[in-house]
Image: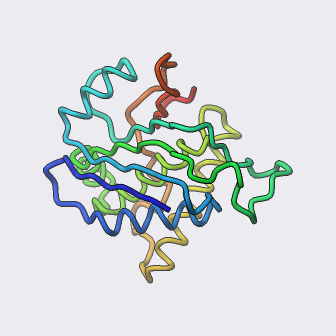
């Protein structure tokens, strides 16, 4: 599995830890081991530019997801087999998750938890959007945030960490963007509005 982390944010972020989290999530979801993922950390001005350009909304946001290939996992409750990697997903370019650590730091301060916990939440959320999960409808919301909670809990358990005190995974929802259709590439996934 190829996970490319690029930090252009100007903030110190543990890139190796972020790559390990992304690998944990993709392994947990049985994404083919040859799949590729890009995580880009940007500053507020770059995120504002992306937010305006692709979402049509002012100001910076916390996370954006830009799916590349039409890889979609079977949703829970369907007849898809989650136990085996999707053979069609081999060498799939999943897409880009773009995170703004400055916005994450502001949200972490508001929620009174660690910035790394917020970045972990945003990365997990963005990856789920790349894989076709959404939260526009109550049923979709329950599925996506339930899965997000389980993935973050298993990540913390694997690392021997306690759950964050005031913000259990998924209890603080990432926020900040919409999801317009774009003719030149698959729709960006936002965290506030569904497509």
Task: Find the residue positioned furthest to the left.
Answer: 10
Residue 45 position in % (x across, y down):
18, 32
Residue 15 sits in which quadrant? bottom left
According to the image, what is the colour scheme of the structure? rainbow
From the viewer's perspective, is residue 15 above or below residue 41? below
Residue 123 position in % (x across, y down):
42, 53
Please tell me which residue is depicted at 59% across the width and 64% down the height of the picture: 150
Please tell me which residue is depicted at 27% across the width and 52% down the height of the picture: 6
Quarter of the figure with the C terminus: top right
Residue 158 position in % (x across, y down):
50, 79
Please tell me which residue is depicted at 25% across the width and 26% down the height of the picture: 49
Task: Find the residue positioned furthest to the right.
Answer: 79
* Residue situated in front as seen by the camera: 103 or 7: 7
Total numbered labels: 0
Task: Find the residue positioned furthest to the bottom.
Answer: 160
Is 157 on the left-hand or right-hand side of 139? left
From the viewer's perspective, is residue 62 above or below residue 20? above
Residue 1 position in % (x across, y down):
50, 62
Is 15 on the left-hand or right-hand side of 176? left
From the viewer's perspective, is residue 74 above or below residue 26? above
* Residue situated in front as seen by the camera: 165 or 25: 25
Please tell me which residue is depicted at 61% across the width and 40% down the height of the picture: 132
Is 20 on the left-hand or right-hand side of 75? left
Residue 12 sits in which quadrant? bottom left
């Amino acid at each position: 599995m190829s996970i490319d982390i690029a930090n252009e944010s100007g903030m110190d972020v543990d890139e190796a830890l972020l790559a390990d989290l992304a690998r944990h999530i993709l392994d947990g979801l049985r994404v083919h081991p040859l799949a590729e993922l890009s995580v880009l950390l940007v500053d507020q001005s770059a995120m504002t530019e992306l937010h305006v350009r692709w979402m049509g909304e002012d100001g910076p946001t916390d996370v954006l997801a830009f799916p590349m290939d039409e890889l979609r996992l079977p949703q829970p409750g369907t007849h898809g087999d989650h136990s085996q990697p999707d053979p069609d997903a081999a060498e799939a370019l999943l897409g880009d998750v773009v995170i703004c650590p400055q916005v994450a730091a502001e949200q972490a301060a508001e929620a009174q938890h660690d910035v790394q916990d917020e970045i972990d939440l945003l990365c997990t959320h963005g990856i789920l959007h790349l894989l076709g999960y959404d939260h526009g409808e109550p049923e979709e919301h329950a599925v996506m945030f339930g899965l997000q909670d389980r993935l973050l809990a298993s990540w913390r358990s694997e690392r021997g960490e306690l759950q964050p005190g005031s913000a259990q995974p998924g209890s603080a929802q990432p926020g900040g963007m919409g999801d317009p259709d774009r003719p030149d590439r698959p729709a960006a996934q936002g965290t506030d509005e569904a497509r």
